[in-house]
Amino acid sequence: MKKSFGFLFAAAALALASFDVNAQAPTGDIPPDMNALMSKYTCIACHRPNQRLVGPAYADVAKKKYSDEEIVNLIYNPIPSHWPGYPPMAPMKQVPKEDAMKLATWINSLDKSPAKKAGSSKAKGKGKKAA
Ligand code: HEC
C-alpha cells in the first residue's frame, strides 16, 4: 500500500511538474549530458541545479557533503527525513549504477559554499535537525 502510494505520488508530481518545465524552471544551467540523463530518468521533473522544485535544488543536496556513493544509495533508497517539508521521493532503482554515479558526481560538483561561506562555522551541515 505504502509503495503504491509513492508511485501514484510520483506520477502525479511528474504530471504536474511537466507543465512547469517550460513555464518557470530554467534548464539552461544543466550540462547537455546531465540534461539527457535527468530527462531519461525523469529527475528533471522534480530537480534543478539551483532551484527548489518538487525536490530540493541539487546545489542544496551538495551542501550536505555526501560522498558520491552515498548519493547513489540515496537515489536507490531515498531517506525523506533528510528533507523535512518535502514530499518523499520514490526510489529510482531503474537507474543503472553507472548513470547514477555520473549524476551523483555532478550533483556534488554543484556545491559552491566554501567560497561564499568562508569564515562561518561548518557545524550546521553535519547534524541532522529533527523536524
Ligand atoms: C517525483 C519527483 C522526483 C523525481 C522524479 C526525482 N526526485 Fe530526487 N527528490 C525528490 C524529493 C521530493 C526529494 C526530497 C525528499 C526525499 O529525499 O525523499 C528528493 C531528494 C533527492 C536527493 C537528496 C537525497 C537526500 O537524502 O539528501 C537526491 C540526491 C535526489 N533526489 C536525486 C534524484 C535523481 C538523481 C533523480 C533521477 C534519477 C531523482 N532524484 C528523481 C523528488 C524527486
Image (cartoon, rainbow, N blue to C red):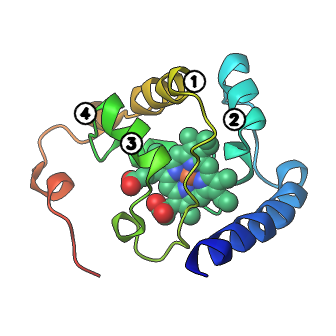
User: In the rendered image, is residue 12 in sight?
Assistant: yes
Where is 78 relative to 61, above or below? below
Q: Position of residue 116 (x, y in %)?
A: 30, 38
The residue tagged 1 is 99
In the displayed structure, does residue 81 sit left or right of residue 117? right
Between disc 1 and disc 2, whose residue precedes? 2
What is the distance, in whole Å, between disc 3 and disc 2 at their CAs?
17 Å
Between disc 3 and disc 2, whose residue precedes? 2
- As shown in the figure, which amino acid type bears the numbered disc 3? Asn
For the N terminus, the image quarter is bottom right
The residue tagged 4 is 114
Q: Is mark 2 within 8 Å of ligand 1?
A: yes
Where is 129 relative to 29, above or below? below
The residue tagged 3 is 73
Q: Nearer the viewer, residue 71 or 64?
A: 71
Q: Is mark 4 within 8 Å of ligand 1?
A: no
Circle 3: element type = helix
Q: Residue at x 67, y 45 (%)?
A: 43
What is the distance, in whole Å, between disc 1 and disc 3 at their CAs?
12 Å
What is the distance, in whole Å, between disc 3 and disc 4 at their CAs?
25 Å
- As shown in the figure, which amino acid type bears the numbered disc 4? Pro
Task: Kindly indicate the quadrant of the structure image that contains residue 42.
Answer: top right
In the displayed structure, does residue 51 sit left or right of residue 78? right
Q: Depth-wise, is mark 1 or mark 4 nearer the camera? A: 1
Q: Depth-wise, is mark 3 or mark 4 nearer the camera? A: 3
Q: Position of residue 68 (x, y in %)?
A: 35, 29
